[in-house]
Image (cartoon, coloured by chain):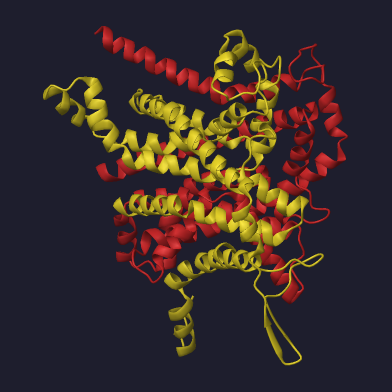
Chain colours: A yellow, B red
């Protein structure tokens, strides 16, 4: 092959669009157009007025008159109706409870995984990932069968008398009735998001320098003290990453509350869904979404900061 | 010594209990797909009738075919976009808007899907009002899945790219390879396994998605998860268990096979590397 010398035009094209800039520009533009720009549209529609089938333009120009109509009615409605606030607060509470439960189950789990023999660790990791590859929708659906009266898990819980405890804690509406309660909702979310907690914690704990624990023991620390004073502080990044991976998506979760929750377990994802699909009120659904974005913007910023640090540290 | 052995057994017990928790629903799905009774909690004997019903279930099968096509396109698109994004983040430490870029890449991982679905739909509707396209359907569902899949693919490929030894690429450049040759001949073979895992992950993500598909689907484009979801909402349905079992078996075999191939390739590569550095 004889490479023809590049003419000025080719050089210009490659200099501007080639290699580096193209690698950055393609994903950048894609995300900008389909991820970032839509949020501005949601903001715009949240202050639009709904006409019979679609929304009205904000700025109209007719017969020499420029009309700008902004309707803040949906926001006023959200602020005035206590139901919305209760739903937002309840979503935060359910997401918080789920995060704590995932941490409680997931931290020891990741810890023992990271301390297992190095030959079995890949297999254990595979076993944590495998349910993640099978359908999430179907696994959530399966809990309905397990928790309805006479289901496997319901039998065990009732047999051990744990339903009395749950009832006393106000998590189920009557002893023996486990489905469509706060209990079934939080159980389902914990189940679904547990791998998201385990995986970052595991990768963090597996990298830890075990000589630090020996040093702590040499200096007279009991294993328990060493765990709390050395292991836990060193795994802070993993704890934050895992907690955010659970907490943020849980706030807006829709499928799990719909399948496992009940009429009294209000979650904001369901409200948004109903405003859009049942009431066909796009401005209202958009306003609910805007308020939800405002709620998650702080945890999201924390998550992005740790994600970026983890990327650049290596 | 007693404390150490207690710790070991406590650890094993915790892991075992955790795995029971993770796998119990999957086992229950499979077991009750063979149950003669339509009730999900009463065992009344073995049957294959739900599988027979599945073969004749037009709605489910056409949903499966549509989901399969979308998942295939999503996996390919996500791997391409994710690889580009991972490259940009790992190789170019400084460019204008990098913070915004890395934020946009990782945000879809955690952003509630109802928000992503609603905002993408409203934008597409606005575009359609202005330009007359795109119609809601397979293409719009694909766009939504691509957004989510790209974020996951980026994380997977990025982790591999960071672990690469940059000296190998530098050596190739010293030997006169052009940047694109370095990419195709050196970098790509080394990250191929992560591309395969990213492909599989985004394929299953797309095959499973309910929320984005519900927002972005149009008339006549009902994916399999939407069919399953609308039936599951109404109550328990053994035909769903049959579908679930088929999916679980296919995915489990596929993933185990792929990870076996990945592990074997990795071992061989490490042996070659070891041989090369010894020689």
- Across and down, in percent, residue A310 comes to 34, 49
Which quadrant of the structure image shows residue B237? top right
Residue B18 in view of the camera: yes
Q: How many marks?
A: 0
Task: Report the residue at 33% width, 33% height from top.
Answer: A206
Residue A2 in view of the camera: no
- Across and down, in percent, residue A200 comes to 41, 39
- Across and down, in percent, residue A188 comes to 59, 31
Q: Is residue A311 above or below residue B84?
A: above
Which quadrant of the structure image shows residue B5? top left
Taking the image as shown, residue A207 lies to the left or right of residue B203, namely left
Q: Nearer the viewer, residue A190 or A18?
A: A190
Q: Is residue B76 above or below residue A177?
A: below
- Farthest residue, direction left: A219
Task: Report the residue at 74% width, 39% height from top.
Answer: B229
Task: Report the residue at 58% width, 63% height from top.
Answer: A39
Taking the image as shown, residue A200 lies to the left or right of residue A156, namely left
- Across and down, in percent, residue B12 comes to 41, 16
Taking the image as shown, residue A53 lies to the left or right of residue B6, namely right
Task: Report the residue at 58% width, 25% height from top.
Answer: A171
Q: Nearer the viewer, residue B48 or B180?
A: B48
């Amino acid at each position: 092959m004889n490479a023809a010398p590049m003419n000025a035009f080719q050089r210009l094209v490659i200099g501007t669009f080639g290699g580096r800039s193209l690698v950055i520009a393609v994903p950048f533009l894609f995300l900008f157009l389909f991820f970032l720009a839509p949020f501005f549209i949601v903001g715009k529609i949240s202050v639009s007025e709904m006409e019979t089938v679609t929304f009205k333009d904000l700025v109209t120009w007719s017969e020499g008159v420029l009309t700008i109509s902004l309707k803040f009615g949906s926001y006023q409605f959200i602020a005035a109706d206590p139901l919305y606030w209760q739903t937002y607060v309840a979503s935060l509470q359910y997401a918080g409870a789920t995060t704590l439960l995932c941490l409680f189950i997931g931290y020891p789990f990741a810890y023992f995984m990271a301390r297992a023999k190095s030959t079995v660790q890949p297999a254990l990791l595979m076993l944590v990932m495998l349910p993640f590859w099978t359908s999430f929708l179907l696994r959530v659906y399966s809990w309905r069968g397990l928790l309805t009266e006479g289901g496997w898990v319901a039998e065990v819980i009732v047999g051990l008398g744990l339903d009395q405890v749950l009832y006393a804690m106000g998590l189920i509406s009557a002893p023996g009735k486990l489905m469509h309660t706060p209990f079934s909702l939080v159980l389902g979310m914990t189940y679904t998001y547990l791998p998201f907690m385990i995986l970052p914690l595991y990768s963090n704990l597996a990298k830890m320098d075990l000589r630090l624990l020996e040093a702590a023991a040499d200096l007279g620390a009991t294993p328990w003290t060493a765990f709390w004073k050395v292991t836990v502080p060193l795994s802070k990044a993993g704890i934050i990453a895992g907690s955010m991976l659970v907490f943020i998506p849980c706030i807006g979760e829709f499928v799990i509350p719909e399948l496992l929750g009940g009429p009294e377990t209000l979650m904001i994802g369901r409200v948004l869904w109903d405003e859009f699909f049942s009431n066909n009120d796009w401005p209202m659904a958009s306003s609910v979404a805007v308020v939800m974005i405002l709620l998650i913007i702080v945890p999201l910023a924390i998550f992005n900061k740790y994600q970026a640090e983890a990327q650049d540290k290596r | 010594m007693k404390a150490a052995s207690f710790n070991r057994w406590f650890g094993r017990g915790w892991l075992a209990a955790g795995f029971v928790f993770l796998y119990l629903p999957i086992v229950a799905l499979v077991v009750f797909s063979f149950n003669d009774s339509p009730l999900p909690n009463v065992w009344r004997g073995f049957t294959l009738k739900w599988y027979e019903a599945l073969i004749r279930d037009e709605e489910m099968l056409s949903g499966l075919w549509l989901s399969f096509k979308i998942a295939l396109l999503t996996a390919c698109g996500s791997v391409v976009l994710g690889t580009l994004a991972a490259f940009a983040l790992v190789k170019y430490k400084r460019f204008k808007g990098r913070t915004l870029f890395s934020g946009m890449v990782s945000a879809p991982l955690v952003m509630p899907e109802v928000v992503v679905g609603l905002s993408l739909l409203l934008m597409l509707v606005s575009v359609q009002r202005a330009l007359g396209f795109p119609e809601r359907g397979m293409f719009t569902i694909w766009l939504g899945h691509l957004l989510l899949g790209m974020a996951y693919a980026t994380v997977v490929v990025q982790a591999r790219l960071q672990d690469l030894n940059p000296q190998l690429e530098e050596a190739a450049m010293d030997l006169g390879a052009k940047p694109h040759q370095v990419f195709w001949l050196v970098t790509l073979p080394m990250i191929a396994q992560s591309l395969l895992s990213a492909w599989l992950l985004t394929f299953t993500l797309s095959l499973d998605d309910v929320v984005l598909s519900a927002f972005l689907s149009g008339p006549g484009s009902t994916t399999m998860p939407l069919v399953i979801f609308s039936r599951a909402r109404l109550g328990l349905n053994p035909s769903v268990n049959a579908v679930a079992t088929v999916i679980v078996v296919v995915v489990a075999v596929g993933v185990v096979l792929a990870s076996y191939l990945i592990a074997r390739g990795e071992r061989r590569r490490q042996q070659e590397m070891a041989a090369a550095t010894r020689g």
